[in-house]
């Protein structure tokens, strides 16, 4: 396990050192940073796990996580938030940002070590075994496991069919799907569905996802696709 690298980011230097000492005793390689600004100067793509404090200076842990999740080189790195903020809204914000766990202060070191190990077990799999849990495009996030869609951390209420259409298009950016393709993939369990049903669902979906609605384009005579440029 000594090749598993963890970065601890917290403005409490003593806490950083305590976490570093205890995690290194478990066999992990641990670095520390005392601010998000300091951490972002590091080559974060080389770390396997991040422990982030939420309330830090100008760049908070939430803001840092948002930056990392938008970068394809760091979006896959698991994040555990460690914070004194333990309200329901803060917890929801953390998970909407793609956090893998959320630990409230004060905590026991045994709890932190146990949760680190749990996250590692869930995420440290060969690439071919990993299940994609989220798909993102800018601030649009589809949580495949929880079946939720959010924009700028605000959940968007979609019907099951709208969710499945958006997931299909976002998973295959730039690919055009005919109405027949969408019927086969999204309405596979239905006996008879009109083409007009797809058009109605697309129209509603465009409205619900606001500025991203224009990304779902119609290719006349062919079908629909999600364009990124």
Image: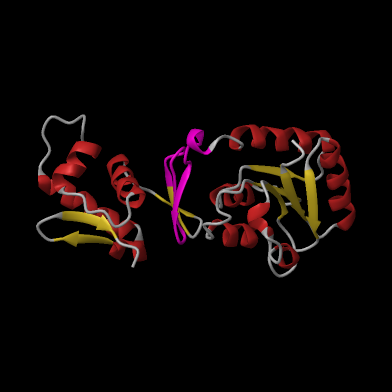
The reply, left or right, for residue 130 in relation to residue 19 is left
Question: Can the viewer see residue 108?
Answer: no
Q: Residue at x 51, y 36 (%)?
A: 130
Quadrant housing residue 39: bottom right
Quadrant housing residue 103: top right
Is residue 139 located in the magenta-colored stretch of the structure? yes
The reply, left or right, for residue 92 in relation to residue 172 is right
Viewer-proximal residue among 201 and 23 = 23
Residue 34, percent across and down? 80, 61
Viewer-proximal residue among 17 and 94 = 17
The reply, left or right, for residue 218 in relation to residue 206 is left
Instruction: Looking at this view, name the residue that lies furthest to the front.
Output: 3
Give above or below for 60 relative to 22: below
Name the quarter where the N terminus is drawn.
Answer: top right
Is residue 122 located in the magenta-colored stretch of the structure? no
Q: Residue at x 29, y 57 (%)?
A: 174
Q: Residue at x 45, y 54 (%)?
A: 136
Instruction: Looking at this view, name the residue that lies furthest to the bottom.
Output: 58
Image: magenta residue range: 127-148
Residue 93, percent across and down? 58, 52
Residue 218, percent across and down? 19, 60
Question: Can the viewer see residue 227?
Answer: yes
Residue 204, percent across and down? 25, 54
């Amino acid at each position: 396990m000594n090749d598993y690298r963890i970065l601890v980011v917290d403005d409490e230097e003593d806490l950083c050192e305590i976490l570093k000492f205890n995690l290194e005793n478990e066999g992990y390689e641990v670095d520390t940073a005392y601010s998000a600004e300091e951490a972002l100067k590091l080559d974060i793509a080389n770390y396997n796990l991040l422990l982030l404090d939420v309330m830090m200076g100008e760049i908070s842990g939430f803001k840092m996580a948002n930056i990392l999740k938008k970068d394809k080189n760091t979006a896959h790195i698991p994040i555990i938030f460690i914070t004194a903020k333990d309200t329901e809204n803060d917890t929801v914000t953390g998970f909407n940002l793609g956090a893998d766990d959320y630990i409230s202060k004060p905590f026991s070191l045994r709890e932190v070590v146990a949760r680190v190990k749990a996250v590692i077990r869930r995420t440290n799999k060969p690439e071919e075994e990993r299940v994609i849990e989220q798909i993102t495009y800018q601030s649009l996030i589809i949580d495949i496991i929880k079946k939720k869609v959010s924009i700028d951390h605000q959940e968007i209420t979609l019907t099951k069919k709208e969710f499945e259409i958006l997931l299909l298009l976002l998973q295959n950016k730039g690919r055009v799907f005919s109405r027949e393709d969408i019927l086969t993939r999204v309405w596979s369990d239905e006996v008879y569905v009109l083409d007009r049903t797809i058009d109605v669902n697309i129209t509603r979906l465009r409205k619900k996802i606001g500025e991203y609605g224009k990304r779902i384009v119609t290719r006349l005579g062919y079908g629909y696709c999600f364009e990124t440029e």
